[in-house]
Image: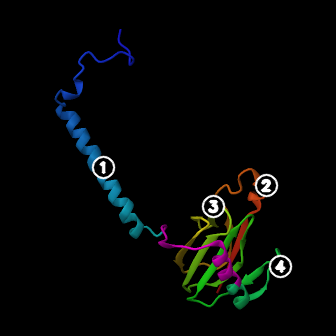
């Protein structure tokens, strides 16, 4: 009785000819792999769910300064629920959003149908950017500034949640890491 632990009876088994049906299955599997690989690239351009983005090297200090400059220039009010600054940059401008334990700042107010360049970076550890209920997800890392062009097409209040477990053993506040984007008419 043979088991998988016993050596094959023919030590040169790999030199034996391949059956015709096996060759067809190998060709079919290889063709399917090529097709799926092509669609990974093609779906990025065809599928509306994939947002193109750019990434640049930065430092937490440099990015924090960009966020602070934006807040100083475009703050329109304090949020009633959180007391955080609500920033409303003009359409077509660059918008900066910083992730840090345990918050996103500032709260953004954007206009529906207007294009913005959203810059995101982390000031401490890796975070996730999950825009709900739209199901847009990014990973946000310290040292990198991710930039994506977006045009809000719905009005309302959109929640930002951290989709990555941030903080290691000190992650007591991870579940409270929320942000907000208001989209107005």
Up the image or down, 92 lies above or below 161; here it is below
Q: Nearer the viewer, mark 1 or mark 3?
A: 3
> Callout 2: helix, strand or loop?
loop
Residue, disc 2: 172
Q: Tell which of 89 and 171 is nearer to you.
A: 171
Which range is magenta?
A: 49-68
- 156 or 18: nearer the viewer: 18
| Structural distance between the alpha carbons of marks 2 and 3 | 16 Å
Is 19 displayed left or right of 56 in the figure?
A: left
Q: Nearer the viewer, mark 2 or mark 3?
A: 3
Q: Residue at x 26, y 15 (%)?
A: 9
What's the CA distance linking mark 2 and mark 4?
25 Å
Q: Tell which tag, 4 or 3, sits nearer the viewer.
A: 3
Q: Place residue 11 in its image quadrant.
A: top left
Q: Is residue 70 left or right of residue 80?
A: left
Mark 1 crowd level (few <14, some 14–19, many ≥20, 10 Å Cα): few
């Amino acid at each position: 009785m043979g088991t998988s632990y016993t050596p094959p009876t023919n030590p040169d088994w790999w030199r034996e000819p391949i059956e015709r049906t096996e060759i067809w299955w190998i060709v079919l599997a290889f063709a399917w792999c090529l097709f799926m690989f092509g669609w990974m690239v093609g779906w990025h351009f065809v599928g509306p769910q994939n947002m193109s983005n750019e990434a640049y090297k930065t430092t937490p200090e440099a990015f924090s300064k960009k966020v602070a400059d934006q807040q100083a220039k475009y703050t329109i009010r304090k949020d009633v629920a959180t007391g955080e600054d609500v920033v409303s940059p003009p359409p077509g401008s660059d918008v900066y959003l910083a992730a840090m334990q345990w918050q996103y700042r500032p709260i953004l107010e954007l206009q529906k149908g207007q294009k913005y360049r959203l810059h995101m970076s982390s000031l401490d550890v890796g975070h996730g950017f999950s825009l709900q209920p739209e199901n847009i997800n990014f990973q946000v890392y310290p040292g990198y500034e991710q930039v994506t062009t977006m045009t809000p097409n719905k009005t309302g209040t959109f929640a930002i949640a951290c989709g990555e477990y941030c903080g290691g053993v000190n992650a007591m506040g991870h579940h409270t890491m929320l942000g907000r984007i208001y989209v107005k008419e």
